[in-house]
Image (spheres, rainbow, N blue to C red):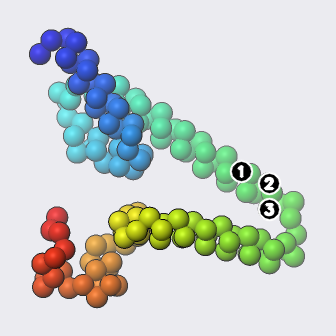
Amino acid sequence: MSESAKAVERTSYLDYVNALSLQEALWWFIENGHEDLPGRSEIFFSLRERMRAARSAVLHATSAARRIAGLLTESTGPVLDSVVHDECSAYATVINNGGTESQVQYLLSNGWAEAMILREVGADQATDHSLPRP
């Protein structure tokens, strides 16, 4: 393979991984990041920077939450209860409006197993042949 073809292949893998969510990208790298993968180092360092940025965002949010909570009184709780409820409800609406695939993706990303989802909707995986098999 020519050097220019290898460069295109490396870019393609990197573009592909960058288009995935961080969790999906990390799993892709775990499964496919063998020593001979073109652009392996670039993909690794890109993922490392994404992890650092995600961690930084979490730390910043945690720090901000502590600071803001320290400024508020206990009586603020009921006011924030309704705000949090409204925000979560709006998020749930977006997920639900995205259809079944969106709902399943949300549940899977929040710890639900396939069997739990199928059980919830009353689908018996052993007898329902209309469901796709992994």
Q: Quadrant of the N terminus?
A: top left
Q: Which residue is mark 2?
A: 67
Q: Is residue 82 above or below residue 62?
A: below
Residue nearest the viewer, comparing 45 with 126: 126
Q: Which is more toward the observer, 73 or 130?
A: 130
Query: At label 3, which amino acid type do we have?
Result: Ala
Residue occupying the far top of the picture: 3
Q: Which residue is mark 3?
A: 69
The alpha-carbon separation of the residues under discs 3 and 2 comes to 6 Å
Q: Residues at badges 3 and 2 in contact (C-beta under 8 Å)?
A: yes
Vertical placement of residue 57 versus 116, above or below: above
* Structural crowding at the residue carrying mark 3, measured as other residues with C-alpha within 10 Å and reported as few (<14), some (14–19) or many (≥20): few
* Label 1 secondary element: helix
Question: What SS does tag 2 mark?
Answer: helix
Q: Earlier in the sequence, mark 3 or mark 1?
A: 1
**Tag 2: residue type?**
Arg
Name the residue nearer the viewer: 119 or 56: 119
Q: Residue 116 falls in which quadrant of the image?
A: bottom left
Name the residue carrying label 1: 63
How many numbered marks appear? Answer: 3
Estimate the x, y position of residue 3 in percent, counting from the top left: 20, 11
Going by the image, does 129 lie left or right of 8? left
Where does the image place residue 76, in percent across and percent down from the top left?
A: 84, 72
Residue 60 placed where, x, y %?
A: 67, 46
Distance (Cα) linking label 1 and label 2: 6 Å
Based on the displayed image, in which of its 4 quarters is residue 44 positioned?
A: top left
Measured as percent of width and height from the top left, residue 61 is found at 67, 51
Residue at disc 3, secondary structure: helix
Q: Residue at x 79, y 62 (%)?
A: 69
The relative height of residue 18 versus residue 4 in the rendered view (above or below) is below
**Residue 111, can we see it?**
no
